[in-house]
């Protein structure tokens, strides 16, 4: 099991609660400090989600100074990333950062540079990478069973006003930045490094909603360095109370239809007749990502999604928004 790991959490909303649950459920791992927007909120969180055992703080700097932590989870809205990861890394504390790791690539690059210079482990919360079906396709890409990836066709659909910070572009970055980035990251995870991007965005159904400044409709085309391509669309005007993420990946020997990260139909196309295989192995992808991070902290496995990859996917969605601001102009990734 290795040594006992002491973990802190900064940001005590839904993701902070989820990660606390999973961390405290792992042997030899304890949430020993939490930091919220106020001392009172942190104390209430510690009592409810850490069994009253965690020290509570209203300032992250105090927590990092006073506690001996092995790792910290940064679970904040995009505009809330104002130095927590860098401060932790400078103290030799490993960092798990929820996506998107910042509101722009300059800020994200500073975070990544600080973490890499400190030499601490890191992970970004792209939980879809840990789905069983995604990992099965990744394996088949690696061993040649799938053949070369050619096309990624992805969608992210929902219909919700969400929280006030989410519908404020200055705080969330918009739907492409804060939600659909999962789909863009998946395209990069499977197809590699982008080379050219063109995107469009609009607010078509929420123009009369006060304080709603994010897009509710978007579409982008991405060309990758390998020559592969992706089309990715997102909507916040689909079916209310449903969050749907689906994608298709066409490879030289295989077409994969994904209904979430754990379920897919694999159609093998290299033989005389297509062979269909349904794949569905349910996993809690949030638990799996934390187990992978803990393994990396203990030297029992590689860093599965280090902060540099959070910067890479953020740069992609940033180019999509920049292209949309220029009426779909094709922009280089770098």
Image: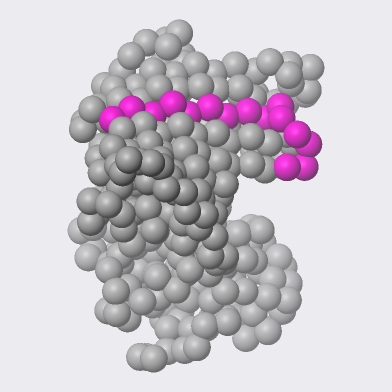
- Asked whether 214 or 70 is in front, the reply is 214
What residue lies at 51% left-to-right and 50% top-to-bottom?
264
User: Can residue 139 be spotted in the picture?
Assistant: yes
What is the span of residues highlighted in magenta in the rendered image? 228-242
Q: Classify residue 38 by image quadrant.
A: bottom right
Q: Is residue 298 above or below residue 40?
A: below
Q: Position of residue 267 (x, y in %)?
A: 43, 45
| Furthest residue toward front | 272
Picture coordinates of residue 20, whole percent (x, y)? 59, 72
Q: Residue at x 48, y 84 (%)?
A: 29
* Residue 149, magenta (yes or no): no
Q: How is the image coloured?
A: one colour
- Most extreme residue toward the top is 327
Q: Position of residue 107 (x, y in %)?
A: 36, 40
Q: Is residue 9 visible?
A: no
| Quarter containing the N terminus | bottom left
Left or right, residue 188 beside residue 30: left
Q: Residue at horizontal 30%, vertical 65%?
A: 303
Name the foreground residue: 212 vs 328.
Answer: 328
Identified at 48% across, 68% down, the residue is 288
Name the spot of residue 207 as percent of width and height, x first: 73, 16
Q: Depth check: 29 or 83 in front?
A: 29
């Amino acid at each position: 099991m290795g040594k006992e790991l002491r973990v802190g959490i900064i940001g005590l909303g839904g993701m902070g609660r989820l990660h606390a649950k999973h961390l405290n459920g792992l042997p030899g791992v304890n949430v020993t400090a939490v930091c919220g927007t106020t001392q009172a909120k942190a104390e209430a969180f510690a009592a409810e989600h850490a069994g009253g055992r965690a020290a509570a703080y209203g300032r992250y700097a105090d927590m990092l100074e006073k506690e001996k932590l092995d790792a910290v989870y940064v679970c904040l809205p995009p505009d809330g990333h104002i130095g927590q990861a860098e401060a932790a890394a400078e103290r030799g504390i490993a960092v798990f950062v929820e996506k998107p790791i910042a509101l722009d690539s300059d800020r994200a690059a500073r975070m990544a540079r600080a973490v890499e210079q400190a030499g601490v482990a890191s992970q970004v919360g792209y939980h879809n990478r840990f789905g069983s079906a995604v990992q099965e396709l990744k394996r088949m890409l690696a061993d040649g069973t799938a053949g070369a990836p050619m096309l990624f066709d992805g969608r992210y659909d929902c219909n919700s006003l969400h929280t006030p910070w989410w519908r404020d572009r200055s705080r969330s970055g918009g739907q492409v930045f804060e939600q659909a980035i999962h789909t863009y990251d998946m395209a990069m995870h499977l197809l590699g490094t982008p080379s050219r991007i063109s995107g469009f965005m609009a607010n078509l159904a929420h123009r009369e909603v006060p304080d709603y400044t994010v897009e509710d409709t978007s579409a982008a085309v991405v060309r990758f360095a390998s020559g592969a391509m992706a089309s990715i669309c997102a909507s916040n005007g689909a079916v209310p109370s449903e969050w749907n993420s689906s994608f298709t990946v066409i490879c030289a020997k295989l077409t994969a239809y994904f209904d979430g990260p754990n379920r897919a139909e694999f159609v093998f196309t290299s033989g005389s007749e297509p062979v269909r295989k349904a794949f569905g192995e349910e996993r809690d992808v949030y638990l799996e990502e934390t187990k992978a991070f803990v393994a990396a902290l203990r030297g029992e496995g590689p860093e599965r999604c280090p902060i540099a990859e959070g910067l890479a996917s953020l740069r992609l969605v940033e180019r999509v928004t920049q292209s949309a601001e220029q009426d779909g102009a094709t922009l280089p990734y770098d």
